[in-house]
Image (spheres, rainbow, N blue to C red):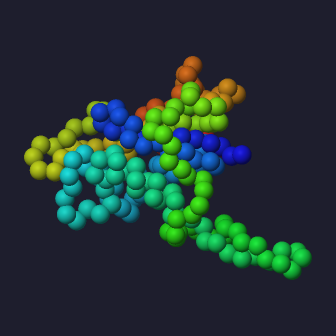
């Protein structure tokens, strides 16, 4: 079991380039915050470059396809260390050590999978949440050279996500008839999350 989700990575033209299935922790407190933390990392310059990028930026994204691959690679490799623990009968077993901070390791089996691009929640019966990750349609682009996000817009205003749920019982302010519980920028998501989920 688990809280299962799909994440669709949509380019500026509205095409879904990739869809990722997540087996566990697909709710906003898990997956939504994973998206937020990765793209809003204060230590790295996650500038979005729609077409080309300058030398010296190693952590931005050159289009949505690049952003999608970076995020999926992060999820597959940012893990708790694997340790051996002793059982009551004297034997040992292998498990994740969740008492320490996770870090980058070799890719881990399971939990995250590629799906058919655009496979929506309405077409399957097993999803609890669906995320559409897209670029703010209102962003302005600079002219000349590699196109980059206008400096007036920070990363939190560039990336947006729409979250839908199949849970009929989930009550949240502004939930639409088709299950949309949030649609906005990452900055707006954090405000919504703090009000609706961070109890």
Please, which residue is most extreme toward the top here? 177
Point out the residue furthest to the left here: 144
Residue 168 percent coordinates (x, y): 67, 26
Residue most extreme to the right: 89
Question: What residue is at 67 percent from the left and 68 percent from the top?
Answer: 96
- In the displayed structure image, the side of residue 151 where residue 61 appears, left or right: right
Q: Position of residue 127 (x, y in %)?
A: 62, 36
Classify residue 101 by image quadrant: bottom right
**Residue 151 visible in this rendered orientation of the protein:** no
Residue 1 visible, this orientation: yes
Q: Is residue 102 above or below residue 192?
A: below
Q: Is residue 34 left or right of residue 23?
A: left
Asked if residue 62 lies left or right of residue 74, the reply is left
Q: Quadrant of the C terminus?
A: top right
Q: Quadrant of residue 122?
A: top right
Q: Residue at x 57, y 19 (%)?
A: 177
How far across and down, in percent of the image, does residue 90 sit? 86, 80
Residue at the image point whose x is 38% and y is 41% from the top: 17
Position of 189 relative to 34 (above/below): above
Whole-percent x, y for residue 68 in the image: 40, 49
Residue 189 vertical position relative to residue 71 in the rendered view, above or below: above
* View extreme (front): residue: 116
Q: How many marks?
A: 0
Q: Residue at x 18, y 47 (%)?
A: 147
């Amino acid at each position: 079991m688990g809280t299962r989700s799909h994440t669709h990575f949509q380019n500026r033209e509205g095409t879904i380039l990739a869809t990722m299935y997540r087996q566990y922790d697909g709710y906003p407190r898990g997956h939504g915050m994973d998206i937020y933390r990765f793209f809003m990392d204060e230590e790295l310059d996650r500038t979005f470059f729609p077409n080309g990028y300058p030398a010296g930026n190693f952590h931005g994204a050159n289009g949505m396809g690049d952003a999608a691959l970076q995020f999926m690679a992060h999820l597959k490799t940012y893990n708790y260390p694997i340790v051996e623990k002793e059982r009551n009968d004297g034997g040992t077993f292998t498990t994740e050590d969740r008492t320490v901070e996770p870090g980058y390791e070799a890719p881990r089996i399971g939990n995250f999978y590629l799906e058919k691009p655009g496979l929506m929640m309405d077409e399957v019966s097993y999803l609890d949440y669906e995320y559409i990750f897209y670029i703010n349609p209102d962003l302005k682009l600079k002219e000349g050279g590699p196109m980059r996000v206008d400096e007036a817009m920070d990363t939190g205003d560039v990336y947006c996500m729409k979250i839908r749920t199949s849970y009929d019982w989930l009550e949240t302010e502004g939930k639409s008839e088709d299950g949309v519980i949030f649609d906005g920028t990452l900055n707006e998501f954090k405000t919504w999350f703090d009000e609706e989920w961070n109890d």
